[in-house]
Image (spheres, grey):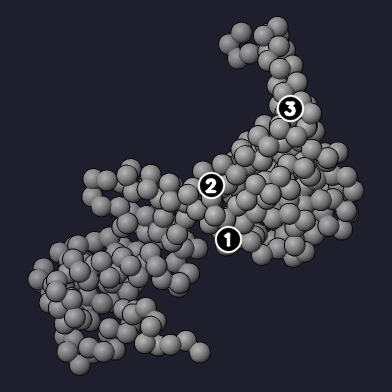
Amino acid sequence: MNDQSTAPLQLSDLISQHSARLTQADTRLLDVLIQDPIRAAMDNGKDVSTRAGVHPASAVRLARRLGFKGYPEFRSFLQSSLTEGENGDFESSAARMAARLVRAEEGSLLASVLDSEIAALNNIRNAVSDSDIRAFSERLRDGRRIFVFGRGHSAALSALIGLRLTRSGYHAINIAAQMEQLPELLCSLSEGDVLWLLSFRRAAPLVQEVRRIAAERGAVTLALTDLHAARMDPAPDHHIAVSRGEPGQSQSLVVPMTIANAIILDLAAIDDGRSIRALSKLRAFRATSRLMPGG
């Protein structure tokens, strides 16, 4: 049973505690705040009062009735509710962006994003081991073909991984870029192939189905996900799940990209020069061909 005394205080709790003191103007203000909690966390007291059609000082009076020293402190409470709450707001891209904005002090947005990225990257040190990286690279090295699949934001990383593996001399297929041929490609999956799945925020039904087909056909599945998309059934053969940032932070794409880069670099270290030879061959071919853009 949850300890109510240690649970985070919500706006609804404050309204219940102080309902006897609330005025008609307070009710109009609260209606505005509750209807759009994202904007409520962004606006100052004057803006909220204007939208509610009450005196500019009404927002300050409401904040004090709810136990705050002034509206800035009340606004900080609303921001914390947005960035730290567990009410599903972060399924909304607008809420995620608003949460990042409210964490950034005025004039230091870039610094806030950098701090968020650095914190998420530092977390990898404790969350991912060299043995995790090696488990992926060994499977890639030994695979007959490598199918890479990601949807949404992870599709960009899927394309990059497919390109880098191809340049390293591996038969890599970015199936995320060939969705119209998805049945044909997955039908050819068999034992000896490797499926590298990427999934962020949630494991979409399509990702789950691709995983199921790979298991049914005996292909090895590697999964690189964030913590929100970590649950897959059946479980992947090897799985790296890592946080891309706390709620209200930037939900870094740098984190999974860094892990993917480490895996591909480790692959080059264990494939008896295959990656190095392929890259050298590609460089020589580029130098002698007329395929370069603008040539």
Secondary element under disc 3, as helix, strand or loop, is helix
Q: Amino acid at mark 2?
A: Val
Q: Are marks 2 and 3 in contact (CB under 8 Å)?
A: no
Left or right: 62 as drawn, with respect to 238: left
Q: Position of residue 98 (x, y in %)?
A: 36, 57
Residues at marks 2 and 3, CA–CA distance in whole angstroms: 23 Å
Q: Residue at coordinates 75% horizontally, 34% vertically from top-left?
A: 270
Characterize the local packing of mark 3: few (<14), some (14-19) or many (20 or more) Cα atoms within 10 angstroms.
Answer: many
Q: Position of residue 186 (x, y in %)?
A: 82, 48
Residue at the disc numbered 1: 227
Residues at marks 1 and 2, CA–CA distance in whole angstroms: 12 Å
Quarter of the image holding residue 285? top right
Tell which of 160 and 222 is nearer to you: 222
Residue at the disc numbered 2: 255
Q: Amino acid at mark 3?
A: Ser
Quarter of the image holding residue 5? bottom left
Q: Residue at coordinates 76% horizontally, 25% vertically from top-left?
A: 273
Secondary element under disc 1, as helix, strand or loop, is helix
Q: Position of residue 191 (x, y in %)?
A: 90, 48
Q: Is residue 7 above or below residue 148?
A: below
* Disc nearer the start of the sequence (2/3): 2
Residue at the disc numbered 3: 275
Residue 117, visible in the rendered structure: yes
Q: Is residue 116 above or below residue 47?
A: above
Tell which of 137 and 116 is nearer to you: 137
* Disc nearer the start of the sequence (3/1): 1
